[in-house]
Image: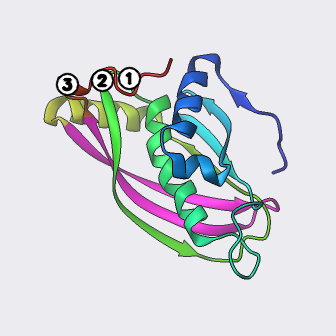
Amino acid sequence: MRNRKVMIEEKYKGIAELSLTLVEAINRTGLEIVALKDRYAKFKMPLQGNTNHIGVMYAGSLFTLGEFTGGIVPAVSFDIEKYFPIVKAINIKFLAMATTDVYLECELSSSDVKRIEAETDENGKADFDLELELKDETGTVVTLVNGTWQLRKIPEEMKGMFKPS
């Protein structure tokens, strides 16, 4: 898990920069984007700066890592000039104390992308579920995040609002 090489496809560098600066609270955690490519993302939440009163990773930082994923994976899966994601519900289960940096990988299948996009085009929105495993540096699953996000069509008045530079 100690992959320090950042692998962000050129076309997603603007999304990476925007996503880490758009919400100041996320920026303060030191969350890092390790990889972005079509329908795939990998993130790292550093232990440093995210510890609680007993020296393990703060639960809020783990939540942030899970919630952030459901917002960024759509940005590398759908046309961000047509759609935007929102979170609807999240359930989080803490399995072990995180005493190292924590990593999360997520990938949407091409069939899921087609289904979600078609439903959004037809209804203006579509729900999608993610089951996420947050792992420490040894590969141990420390937290499970199950959530429902929603992809929505961007209203005319919001077009261009989230476009990376």
Tags 3 and 2 touching, CB below 8 Å: no
Query: Closer to the observer: label 3 or label 2?
Result: 3
* Numbered label attached to residue 79: 1
Residue at 50% in and 30% down: 76
Q: Which amino acid, by three-letter code, is at mark 1?
A: Asp
Q: How is the image coloured?
A: rainbow
Left or right of 94, for residue 129: left
Task: Between residue 112 and residue 75, name the one nearer to us.
Answer: 75
The part of the chain drawn in magenta is 125-152
Whether residues under marks 1 and 2 lie with C-beta atoms below 8 angstroms apart, the answer is yes
Residue named by callout 3: 157
Q: Nearer the viewer, mark 3 or mark 1?
A: 3
Which residue is more in the foreground, 39 or 102?
102
Q: Which mark is residue 82?
A: 2
> Any magenta on residue 142?
yes
Q: Which residue is at the far bottom?
A: 54
In the rendered image, the vertical position of residue 52 relative to residue 157, given as above or below: below
Q: Is 93 rendered above or below residue 101?
A: below
The disc placed on residue 21 is none
**Against 20, is 142 above or below?**
below
Alpha carbons under labels 3 and 1: distance apart:
17 Å
Q: Which of pointers 3 and 1 lies earlier in the amino acid sequence? A: 1
Residue at screen point 45% across, 63% down: 146
Q: Which quadrant of the figure has residue 45?
A: bottom right
Q: Is residue 26 magenta?
A: no
Q: Amino acid at mark 3?
A: Glu
